[in-house]
Amino acid sequence: MLEPPGSEAMLSGSALQQTRGRLLPVLAVLLTCLAVVGIAPYLLDTYSVNVLTRSLLYACVALTVDMLWGYMGILTFGQSAFFAAGAYSAGLFFTHSGFGPGTALAALAMGILAAIAMAVIVGWLAFWHGVSELYASVITLVLPIVCTQLLYSGGAFTGSSSGLSGFESIDLSVEAWFWTAGTLLATLTAAAWVFVSSDAGQVLVAIRENEQRCQYLGLDTPRLKILLFVACAVVCAITGYVFACYSMVVSPELAGFVFGTELVIYTVLGGRATLIGPVLATIAVDYESAQLSGDYPFVWKLILGSVFVVVIVAFPRGLLPFVGDLLRRATAAWRGSPRASTADLPIIDVLDPAEAIGTSAGSGAALRLEGVAKHFGSLKVLDGITLTAGAGELVSLVGPNGAGKTTLMRCIADGLERSSGRIEVNGHDIGRSPPEFCVRLGVGRKFQTANVFNTLTVAECLRIARARLDRPSVFSRSRLIRLPPAAYRTLVATGLDQKLDSPAGILSHGLKQALELTMVLALEARVILLDEPTAGLTKEERAVIGSILKDLVKVDGLCVLLVEHDLDFVRQISSRVVVLHQGKILLDGSVDEVVESHLVKSIYSGAGHQAGPT
Amino acid sequence: MVAQLLDVVSTAAILYAVAAGLLLVFGVMKIINFAHGALLTVGSYAAVVAGQYGLNPWLALPVAAAVGALLGIVIEYFVVRPLYARPLDAILATWGLGIVIGQLLTISFGRGVHFSEPPLRGVVDILAVDYSRYRLALIGVAVVIGVGISALLSRTRLGLDTRAVIMNEDLARGIGINSGRVRFITFAVGSSLAAAAGMLITPLSSVDPNMGTPWLVNAFMLVLVSGSSLVSLAIACVVLGGAQVLVSSYVSPILGGLTIAVLAAIILRVRPQGFAHA
């Protein structure tokens, strides 16, 4: 979305070179694979070539299972249905309208359209806010069952249980079909590889790791899931179309959930999130099935089922990573220690405040709440909260545990949370919008317990935080991370800039908190919600955060809403203090007014005690 | 009209018997036992074998239940327990076990269809309608299963421990409840119920190695819309089972077979907690 600023021409150039250097090996491997595909039919007997054609096509479908499940975390049993959509489209057109160039194209288009329609319906059902992982899988399980039954009930039109056969189709030799399938698989795998190792591919992993954090970084995760789901459905439909043209038989089993689960089994065996693993496993297992199932049909399936169970229990990552580890260990002695490379280190680029385009200041106050209430049944957690905060204000929310502070933060960051009342951010009503929309209006929320992507590095976490504004490339991995000044200052002040390559999961508690704060600031939000950002920090860390917060207000003119228990800390940094008690605003005033008030002391220490706050 | 009403009630009863074990395992262990369908099939074959040995058909019930419990013990120990921390993998592993069990049955009994003797024959006259005595008996069996599990949960020490694990496993362990034992027993009881249900449905359907899958899918959907409550499960069985009967008789049997799965999916989309209380 963003034009790279002119001053970064040199940096962009080097980033581009990076891309070329990364794509070259992929291209080399792709060409090698294509060469193997080209030669194979001359070395194998016709029967094997014929069987392998089917295996190669199945592997294309297994690839989509790995994309969805391995990378994005959606366990899908329904890819068979999309495959069947393409296959049956060919079968139906060629059977009922006859074969010709026109019908061939129409059948392909129809198959793709049907798959898209199915994927959109499934996506609407399965991916929405607050849905459980299991439910999404259930929907993908229902899809093939419904499709199979519809094919069964189609009578002569769909050929019912025996399917359609004997239709005329594209006339190619056995070898030519093998080349077609092989080229399709090699190209798709290479494309998938480039995609998952790009910045956009990292977003998939981030969604798998922590979907909630992604939403509060402004990413519309249900939409992204549906997009990938639809793209994978199209791939399956095209593959299914090729399958029908080559085999000239389509049967309801193609849509079935048994085939759907077999694809999941191949993916597990090969290794989730490896792309190559599921592809190799599918080819090996399907080819062997064809060889052995003639002689030992039940024993073969028995062995397969047993191996599947053993792999899940003992080698959860699958066979390819297991073999890979063994090879690496064996070759480690030769190669010595891995070379340390600085070439891949990320480069941070600080945005000019004028370039920061996150959200416009808008009209009106940065944050305005009117009569906001939240209740669970008859229990009122928040009641009639009316509050206005402007740019350049640091408003501290204090009050005992259970006063409703965190709930209030939740209501501001997610329009679906409150029971009644009105919330405006930069003059815009947030209505009933989900968190990612509130981010667009300019709300950034830091959670009470550090909420980062544990398996991603610090730099990758920051890039995900920037994904909404700096649209990630689907081809390449950029070294450049553009951060607004506030985020950059935080990065440097907390020492995180020295740890860009560390996985977030191994950072200390204080650094995790700092990383999440930096991520929130990278959103270029105007209203920052911080839920106890200093809880569990050392005195020094706390002082650093304190001065960062002061700068956010003074230098960047942000509106900061802070939940904090330490009244000394509050006194040092706040411009205003709001006291919440039992879901209502009790006091709203200057620091001195509130902190010195007897009311606050009595609330904090409980009725009947005269002691001051701790 | 009366016949249809009885169909609805007895269909709900059968679904309840089939889904109860799955619900128990889901409630306690938070995993869906995808081997449930295969265990059900094992129970059906136990009934067939018992029939071949000339056993009283009712005696097939304890035989099936015992075989199911034994299999459940083995599965829990070797497969489910190591996957405690990976619930989605546990689902896949039990599906793999389902394949293994199905193939073992195919190797032992062939792919052909078997039948077994119903424990009860004939019809009773209810309000001028002749209705199958066996289907009526199944209503009673379902009630016994429901009341039995409830009594076990509410009247025994083990039941108390089990309810504690259902509500908050970490806390239950913290106060000294052996949650591993609770899980072990639950899985054995759930598997045993699956096999017993398999025996109960044999007189109504033919027996073949793949018969479990459609039952599994329906039971699975019913459990998902029920949360972990036996009462919600009963409601779900009556509502969705009733819809299945109506669609099958007025629209088409094939669509009837899909009714439960499709309706459950839509119910969960509109109301994620399904038939359970909020």
Image (tube, coloured by chain):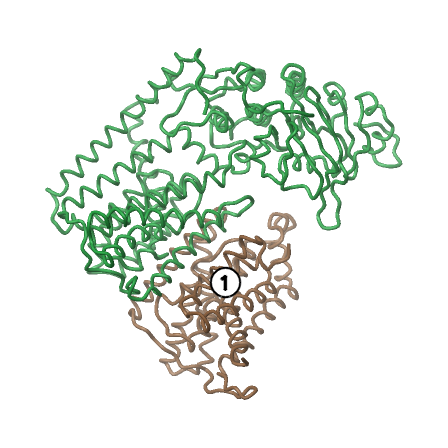
Chain colours: A green, B brown
Instruction: Name the residue rendered at 82%, 30% in the picture.
Output: A587
Q: Across the whole image, how many numbered discs are drawn on residues?
A: 1
Tell whether B148 sits left or right of A192: right
Q: Amino acid at mark 1?
A: Ala
- Label 1 sits on a secondary structure element that is helix
Tell whether A412 sits left or right of B142: right
Q: Which residue is mark 1?
A: B188
Q: Nearer the viewer, residue A376 or A235?
A: A235
The answer to whether residue A604 is above or below residue B47 is above
The answer to whether residue A341 is above or below residue B112 is above
- Quick one: label 1, few (<14), some, or many (20+) residues within 10 Å? many
Residue A274 drawn at (x, y percent): 35, 38
Instruction: Name the residue rendered at 34%, 75% in the picture.
Output: B114
Q: Chain of mark 1?
A: B
Residue A548 drawn at (x, y percent): 64, 18
Residue B85 drawn at (x, y percent): 50, 46
Q: In the rendered view of the protein, which quadrant contains the C terminus of chain A?
A: top right
Q: Nearer the viewer, residue A504 or B237?
A: B237
Residue A578 drawn at (x, y percent): 77, 28
Q: In the rendered view of the protein, which quadrant contains the N terminus of chain A?
A: top left
Tell whether A294 sits left or right of B34: left
Instruction: Name the residue rendered at 71%, 21% in the picture.
Output: A393
